[in-house]
Amino acid sequence: MQLVNLSPAFAITFVYLVTGIIWILWSDTVVIHIAGNNSILLQELQSKKGIAYVLLSGILLFYISHRLYKRLQKTDKQKLSLQQKVEALNSTNPGGMIDYDLVTNEVQMNEKMTFFTPHNELAENSFLEVLFNRIHSSDKERVRTEYTTATSSSAKTLTTEFKLLGSDNNYYTVICTLFLIRNEEAVLKRVIGEIRDITQLRNLQAEYYNQQLKHKHRLASTIIKAQENERNRWAEELHDNISQMLTVVNLYLSNTHVQMDNNVTMIEQARKFINEVQQEIRLLSSSIKPPSFHSTTLKQSVTRLMADIKRIKNIEFSFTEDPSAETDMNDEQKLMAYRVIQEQLNNIIKYANASKIEMNVWCENNAAHISIEDNGNGFDTNKIRSGLGFRNIQSRLQLYNGNMHIDSSPGKGCLLSVSFQL
């Protein structure tokens, strides 16, 4: 047995008792052997024996205590070095650190961790109870489930993100990483981990996302405005140039006197074609030229659009608009609503073979809503949803965080529901 492995008090007591017993037994034998029958010498040796024991035991105890002191001194240096390392780790680590013993319910933590789990609450509840109680209500059940799943399995770590209440009564977004330490029977005994505050990082990410979203909206708005300007230019070109030229040709044909019946028939047929071309140009011009909501309303623009369609298609229209829509929507939002209606009417004319169309526009809860329903052929939404017409509507709705829903099936017509933020 090494003395350095014993406690100082026990080691000194043990050495003193052992050496005392050995000295008494051994010294008496030696003294008697040396003195023989000389009683005077025996008495003198007995008195000096005690002094010798004191000197020898003092030297021995000094040696033992010196070794014990060196041992304690070395242990203190190691402890100080460990404390310095822990303090350095705590100072450089931005997160809160914990060491929780589930058996003894003892917890050790650095100062940063006390910001999220105050000592006054730990005095009344276990560490895990305090931690779960301070998690935001929107995350609490999820985190409990994740912890229960991890502890009931053979998982060695658990990493999760949630909002945690700080000592200043504000919630912070944190990432919690726990190391689950188990015994030989795989029973959880200890939890060591870190909670790192990432609120600033998440705020920066959210700000970056918002900036990207705003940039995307500005870009899409610029593209749509450019498209509308180009449509307006083409509409003016069609109306002012081609349509005027056809009108002049039609007048010339009307004033031409032809005697031969065959020529008369051909000229009349030409006039008929020219009239049809003029109607198509008017319809095309009105479809691409954006209405000016400075001088007209959304209802008037949609009514004019329905009238243009009725010239070439026998369709019964029903259009209802909430009066508040005219005041709640600005000009750009009215134009978007108009284009959504126009795009869907084009889809119905091309593919639905419908005889009746019902449209509604209203505003509520700071959002505009549009519904367009027809009694046409209908379609399988899984196959047609990605069509060009619906993609055009969807791209416009993205400007105002809008969405659309399509309800249709073969032979059952179609209901398009659209909403977007005002």
Image (cartoon, helix red, strand yellow):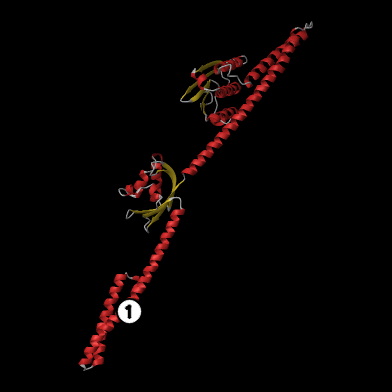
* Amino acid type of the residue tagged 1 in the rendering: Ile
Can you say which quadrant of the picture contains the N terminus?
bottom left
Residue 240 location (% of width, % of height): 70, 17
**Marker count (numbered):** 1
Q: Could you tell whether 177 is left or right of 393 in the image?
A: left
Residue 376 location (% of width, % of height): 55, 21
Q: Could you tell whether 119 is left or right of 358 in the image?
A: left
Q: What residue is disc 1 on?
A: 59
Identify the residue shown where x is 70% and y is 20%.
237
Residue 363 location (% of width, % of height): 48, 22
> Is residue 362 at least partly visible in the picture?
yes
Identify the residue shown where x is 37% and y is 45%.
132
Q: Give the SS element for disc 1.
A: helix
Q: Is residue 68 above or below residue 295?
A: below
Report the front residue among 276 and 134.
Answer: 134
Identify the residue shown where x is 65% and y is 22%.
232
Q: Quadrant of residue 39?
A: bottom left
Q: Is residue 256 above or below residue 222?
A: above
Q: Quadrant of residue 378?
A: top right
